[in-house]
Image: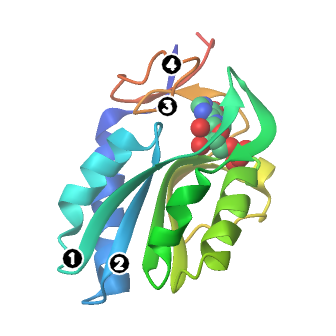
Amino acid sequence: MKILIDEAAIQRRVTELAADIRTAYGAEPFLFLVVLKGAFMFAADLFRRIGAPGMRIDFIRLSSYRGTHSSGKVEIPKGELAHFAGQNILIVEDIVDTGLTLEVFTKALTDAGARSVRICSFLEKTTVNNGRVKIDFLGFPIPDKFVVGYGLDCDEMHRDLPHVAVYNEE
Ligand code: IMP
């Protein structure tokens, strides 16, 4: 598979993002909320580099994709939303594609009484999202191609790659 973003470039960018996030929150407490499963690897690298005093971590499972296509419907475990009331939330996501997942989830967090909601996404398919979701901290803009690696999968495969590759391209 063709490498789109290599391991060294990813690691450099994650270090920069960590510094941006530390600066943005300062001493203010916030919850680093990782969207499973795709963001797990990005989140682990990023989290250990932020070093902000008031930071805690939690995880949530949202799903809208089956194979290489969106199901068009976002599933949020409703019982968990109440925990987020009154908190500053930093959503940590692997990729924003159509923006549907984070549009729905951001609104659900706001409706549940979150104090603030910001988004950190490793990747964005910029021409597809087209401004639908505003990303506060972005790793890399990418073209409209299906990608795998560094946590991202195709039917649960290829999450272990240390780089990002275009699926099914030589
Ligand atoms: P959205 O709701 O269309 O923005 O899709 C967001 C979710 O779709 C992401 O969290 C991923 O799980 C999945 N996704 C979208 N594009 C890709 C891709 O190129 N590779 C792997 N997963 C993707």
Instruction: Give me the C-alpha separation between circle 3 and circle 1.
Output: 26 Å
Measuring 20% from the left and 61% from the top, which residue is drawn there? 49
**Residue that mark 4 sits on:** 156
Confirm or deny contact between disc 3 and disc 4 (CB under 8 A): no
Q: Which residue is mark 2?
A: 30
Pointer 3: residues within 10 angstroms few (<14), some, or many (20+)? many
**Gap between marks 2 and 4 measured at Cα:** 30 Å
Q: Residues within 10 Å of mark 4 (few under 14, many from 20)?
A: some
Q: Earlier in the sequence, mark 2 or mark 4?
A: 2
Mark 3 is on which residue type? Leu
Q: Nearer the viewer, residue 16 or 74?
A: 74
- Secondary element under disc 1, as helix, strand or loop, is loop
Whether label 3 lies within 8 Å of ligand 1 gets the answer yes
Rounded to the nearest whole Å, what is the CA distance between mark 3 and mark 4? 8 Å
Q: Position of residue 83 (x, y in %)?
A: 45, 70
The outermost residue toward the front is 79
Instruction: Decide if residue 118 is in sight here.
Output: yes
Pointer 1 residue: 52
Mark 3 vs mark 2, CA separation in Å: 25 Å
Neighbours of disc 2 within 10 Å: few (<14), some (14-19), many (20+) = many
Specify which label sits upstream in the sequence, 3 or 2.
Answer: 2
Chain-order first, disc 2 or disc 1: 2
Secondary structure beneath disc 4?
A: loop
- Left or right for 52, reference 38: left
Q: Quadrant of residue 142?
A: top right
Q: Are marks 2 and 1 in contact (CB under 8 Å)?
A: yes
Q: Residues within 10 Å of mark 1 (few under 14, many from 20)?
A: many
Cβ–Cβ below 8 Å for labels 3 and 1? no
Q: Amino acid at mark 4?
A: Glu
Under mark 1, the amino acid is Ala
Up-down relation of residue 139 to residue 159 (above or below): below
Front tag of 3 and 4 = 4
